[in-house]
Image (tube, coloured by chain):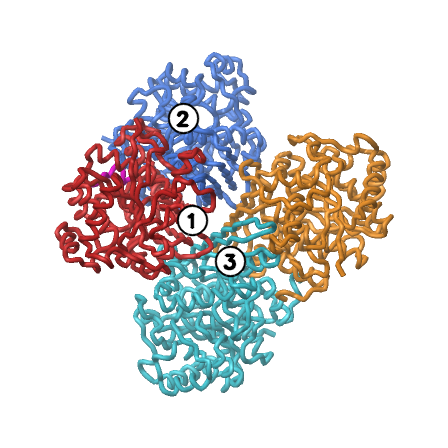
Chain colours: A cyan, B orange, C blue, D red
Amino acid sequence: MVKLVRVAIIGQGYVASIFAVGLERIKLGELGYYGVPLANELPIKVEDIQIVASYDVDKSKIGLPLSEIVKRYWNGHIPESLQEVYVRKGVHLRSLRNLPIEASGLEEEMTLKEAVEHLVNEWKESKVEVILNVPTTEAFTPFGKLEELEKAINENNKDRLTATQVYAYAAAQYAKEVGGAAFVNAIPTLIANDPAFVELAKESNLVIFGDDGATGATPLTADILGHLAQRNRHVLDIAQFNIGGNTDFLALTDKERNKSKEYTKSSVVEDILGYDAPHYIKPTGYLEPLGDKKFIAMHIEYVSFNGAHDELIITGRINDSPALAGLLVDLARLGKIAVEKKAFGTVYEVNAFYMKNPGPRDARNVPRIIAYEKLRQWVGLPPRYL
Amino acid sequence: MVKLVRVAIIGQGYVASIFAVGLERIKLGELGYYGVPLANELPIKVEDIQIVASYDVDKSKIGLPLSEIVKRYWNGHIPESLQEVYVRKGVHLRSLRNLPIEASGLEEEMTLKEAVEHLVNEWKESKVEVILNVPTTEAFTPFGKLEELEKAINENNKDRLTATQVYAYAAAQYAKEVGGAAFVNAIPTLIANDPAFVELAKESNLVIFGDDGATGATPLTADILGHLAQRNRHVLDIAQFNIGGNTDFLALTDKERNKSKEYTKSSVVEDILGYDAPHYIKPTGYLEPLGDKKFIAMHIEYVSFNGAHDELIITGRINDSPALAGLLVDLARLGKIAVEKKAFGTVYEVNAFYMKNPGPRDARNVPRIIAYEKLRQWVGLPPRYL
Amino acid sequence: MVKLVRVAIIGQGYVASIFAVGLERIKLGELGYYGVPLANELPIKVEDIQIVASYDVDKSKIGLPLSEIVKRYWNGHIPESLQEVYVRKGVHLRSLRNLPIEASGLEEEMTLKEAVEHLVNEWKESKVEVILNVPTTEAFTPFGKLEELEKAINENNKDRLTATQVYAYAAAQYAKEVGGAAFVNAIPTLIANDPAFVELAKESNLVIFGDDGATGATPLTADILGHLAQRNRHVLDIAQFNIGGNTDFLALTDKERNKSKEYTKSSVVEDILGYDAPHYIKPTGYLEPLGDKKFIAMHIEYVSFNGAHDELIITGRINDSPALAGLLVDLARLGKIAVEKKAFGTVYEVNAFYMKNPGPRDARNVPRIIAYEKLRQWVGLPPRYL
Amino acid sequence: MVKLVRVAIIGQGYVASIFAVGLERIKLGELGYYGVPLANELPIKVEDIQIVASYDVDKSKIGLPLSEIVKRYWNGHIPESLQEVYVRKGVHLRSLRNLPIEASGLEEEMTLKEAVEHLVNEWKESKVEVILNVPTTEAFTPFGKLEELEKAINENNKDRLTATQVYAYAAAQYAKEVGGAAFVNAIPTLIANDPAFVELAKESNLVIFGDDGATGATPLTADILGHLAQRNRHVLDIAQFNIGGNTDFLALTDKERNKSKEYTKSSVVEDILGYDAPHYIKPTGYLEPLGDKKFIAMHIEYVSFNGAHDELIITGRINDSPALAGLLVDLARLGKIAVEKKAFGTVYEVNAFYMKNPGPRDARNVPRIIAYEKLRQWVGLPPRYL
């Protein structure tokens, strides 16, 4: 029996477009499962993911079919199935601030409370099961207390809330009404790490995965630091740079947004090593011709036996969007599985492998190689190396 | 109650000298446990390791106290305790062939059978518990069948046997007579991977750890490949170079020896990835001024989601001898623990973390981060990340 | 008035195919002059180069039009003009030994002397002006004395001569008969560095450029070493690796051929630094999936003021064939210019910039940035930076 | 006949201390001339440089002998001769702003005009010939017009002037009075590039060298870009990071100062390539444990023949202070030589090799390998490679 997963995407940018095109190419047999961690091992198959709704706030995208949007990011063959889904208007709340994009949001036509209802109704119509949140990095403040969050919504406090926080709130209302849904937060805004949202999720039959999809340099750093820690090599310092040319790097030239990213990335060092080795880890710059293929550089210096000093340098060219898109293929399916398991609130076993800043708050980073095995255990797959 | 481990070293070169000086500096409080994977977590403490015998076949070393030898590799303060152990003559069997070193071995004065007896008697006198084998890489042929090994010893077949094979054989005779001992093979010669030796060890109350201490680039490669495999990134090719200026790199310019090293290193790729990605992994050259601090360079190309091609480059300067010496500090203690556990034969749980080519034959490589947790389990320590 | 250059290519492999396709694409306006050092500054324009003959000894290529061959190396649009030139049979003399290619050569049907006449006649018919020699790297022995070379030809000594030596000899016969021609040796076989050939060229109105086209890591090393030398930084050691997946890297796994390459590359160190810093510079290996885009890695350690030790690491992915093909676009035109200048023999000013091992014998390597300015001076162009 | 150069140092920090200790060690025969570009080729010998005065504004340094200061940066043997020179109080004008250092300056006791006179008198007493300016990077505004500069001094405008501008002004007053002197500006503040100062220097018999000593990544970038430009490879993008742990990197975390540095570094791209390739070149961060040995990482992507895309990555660990200190050994001597040549104003031939931002304004960067040969010509040395 085929078991579909009906997915809504928030933020129809680079990642969401590569996700959409890659998924359809897999269905057409043009591609294997490379870049999808659990490949086709799950009871829900990759081919059973269906995009049923998409949201954006870029005026030039709203109203167009996905096939038109995807062209801007991918110059290969565009599967025909992408002509069927149209981009709808979402909320922005300054999320495109300082970017060369003209924004248009529901909040211009209605209160946030009404916007939430509007979204819930659309999701009901489309029978959405999993909401994948991949807009541009936002500057945000976590809520901590559920009543604060509810107050902000009720008071239509557009300065306090970010788009992601509104979407996550809407997801909870939706889950409550339909009996279960999942919200995957792939950007740095704290959702799975914000007790306000986790509490709300538990009450509302919502599964939250988050925060900030673990692609690129950070999970690799986690595993390399784990490697050093297990040999009791004492890390003296870590420098990590990365520079790219996609909109997310452009957005990070905005100081406020950059700060939230930095927070996420740095927590990994102390979690893995057990001490806070001096480090400089942050997105470094924007260089347009690099496009989506970012350049990363990392330098690690450590002490080995008898006081010897060693050095490692890692550099790389890594396609940013496909890395996250591949994770979303798993997360969409795991979202539905978690709902079936009634694992409402947030699921550390999933977050620990897929997220840079795995929720709930105070949960720690572990080397990803370990997290992977725990994930398999949670989902009922046989161990791979353990 | 203090629990000593009485250790004999074979091959008083760079690694053994750093091992000796580092150990004594730790006892003097000059150093912490950096580079010793299990630090002081084991029931046997680092400070309780005692070097009671040392063997070499370099004429310029035999008869001198360790303090004199260590000076050649370490220009810091030499702990006084190193004046008490003198280097004895071992067997070489061509192991210094083509190196600028004048060799002198027991085999020139007696048959191999007699040499074995001679060693066993010396070990008895010194109450040796663990034998650490760290001579220069040899060109060798494994035995496979125990009777072949015994035949070679009995027939004094100096062309068939290498020094390491003779020492391992002697260790088995010794273990049989005293009721238990451990032989740690830190070089590529197959011992823990040679069924002849494993069978002999089981019969003789000998514990074998081996083969080839996992330092430098190979275990790091294992963990990075594990990292990629867990994301289902498809590895297209792997190139790994390393070049150094110590005697071991000089020895590897000898084609025969290099071949044994290459065999060891390559097995890791298929074991971890599940397919044999095209690779070029071998010690590349000798460059004297690099000294013991080798230069490594690695290039890995892989396919991510939607057919994207990514690239990683890892380079480093790594002190070769301290990396292995730090592992020996654990292996000496684990050797005694394994004897107490009567784990005769070879112990995969130990080998999988510490060895490039973990025995027994057909045992596979796993990412080291996983192997580490399994090791902790075997030895009775709480998990670190699991 | 348009001034054509009529070119014959020897070795219709990767480089020659990229040369042919790139040239025709430039003529069609599909490409600019990127990768052609002197762009369109010379009195002879890029567009005026005409391929009039092509030679190979691969059975699967002989008799086919260039358009068919080029397809094997280039998957873009193939310009129609490439349908007009057909690959003719040349001489091989073991140059494909150990490669997975079936060879067929003129020497199987006639003596070498007859083969030389055969080539001269074909070149006369096609009115060839410049011969570009780009076959696979050969194992060779230089002649030194002209009479030795002539003796080998006359005695049909197929074991003594390589294909390149025969072609260069034929070029001299041809130049003598028609009053002038140029032979560009882009592979390591010593021609411009062999006094026998230089003497013959002078007598025969032949211009020789050579040896071994300076692409990739070596000229970059030259400039970086020049940079260090000018700051009086004392180089302690240099390690340079490179690995690729094209036929030339496959050919270099043949030990004999590799040796000739190593000779060329190493001369650069002492020439530039003024002392022979310890170095390891040689093609390292073959890894098929890398294709024509080789991976290079270089490590340089040096002493700065007050005894400080610094380190540089350079890595890169470099397309091998286009790098050389771009140089050939200049060399073809410079060949004709040199003939017009009656610069018979060999021309150091050209070789010093374009060649890894600039002839004549005993000519030294200088940083390429300097060589470039001297080249401009020789050819009558204004200085760029000087 | 020995020809001394009497030198005053401004800013007795890391660079000045390594300069002092290295110089004295050379005099003692402990060191060769490594890191000094012109070694001992000049008519004035390295051994003939004499430090006769030193200035700082760090309260903890003023009044101490150099031998005490140098200890903070160098843990080897301190030559006794460094006990003879004492650090005097200079002017700071906010140059230590935001640094964890307590400043004390002449401006607190007198007007700037009086401070200038005070300095001139001290220099007369010490018979200073060359002033080496190496304080911490400042935030500054160039003057452009001489009358503006004079007005600021006369009005005691402490907000408008930086310490370096005051020192350079004082140097001009001093040169005028004694008939000639040299001021070497090794930091980014525009002096040789500020027409106000160049005009003043011409009128006052002052030689200015500047601006910003060319150490580390930037001159290497210049030569590598020159290398690419000469092959007509089209540079698509350049990313350059560097991170260190000395006071200068700490100072650059101050946004204002960082800006002046960025300006300097970027000019190199267009000057060398002839077009402004997209680039990101700036000091990236501060990481204390790296100390004076900064980590640099550079990524360059370019187009070669037939549209092929290549990539270079350069990383390195480079001792920052010795690199500049070695240049100062030349600049001190060249300062005196320029005074003798009456080359008042600024000297492009010197600046082009030694400075990141060679004055006068509008002078362009050339590859350093070329600049070096021009320098030799200017100073009367035979060419090295040309």
Q: Nearer the viewer, mark 3 or mark 1?
A: 1
Name the residue carrying label 3: B304
**Chain for mark 1?**
D
SS at circle 2 = loop
Name the residue carrying label 1: D73
Residue A296 sits above or below residue D18 on the image:
below
Q: Nearer the viewer, residue D359 or D140?
A: D140
Report if the CB atoms under discs 1 and 2 are less than 8 Å apart: no
Which quadrant, please, contains the C terminus of chain D? top left
Mark 3 to mark 1 CA distance (whole Å): 48 Å
SS at circle 3 = loop
Residue B177 place in picture, x, y as percent: 87, 48
Q: Is residue C48 left or right of residue B197?
A: left
Which quadrant, please, contains the N terminus of chain D? top left
Residue D256 place in picture, x, y as percent: 29, 59
Q: Which mark is residue B80?
A: none
Q: Amino acid at mark 3?
A: Ser
Residue C217 place in picture, x, y as percent: 44, 38
Q: Nearer the viewer, mark 2 or mark 3?
A: 2
Residue A174 belongs to magenta span? no
Q: Nearer the viewer, residue A154 or C202?
A: A154
| Same-chain status of marks 2 and 3 | no
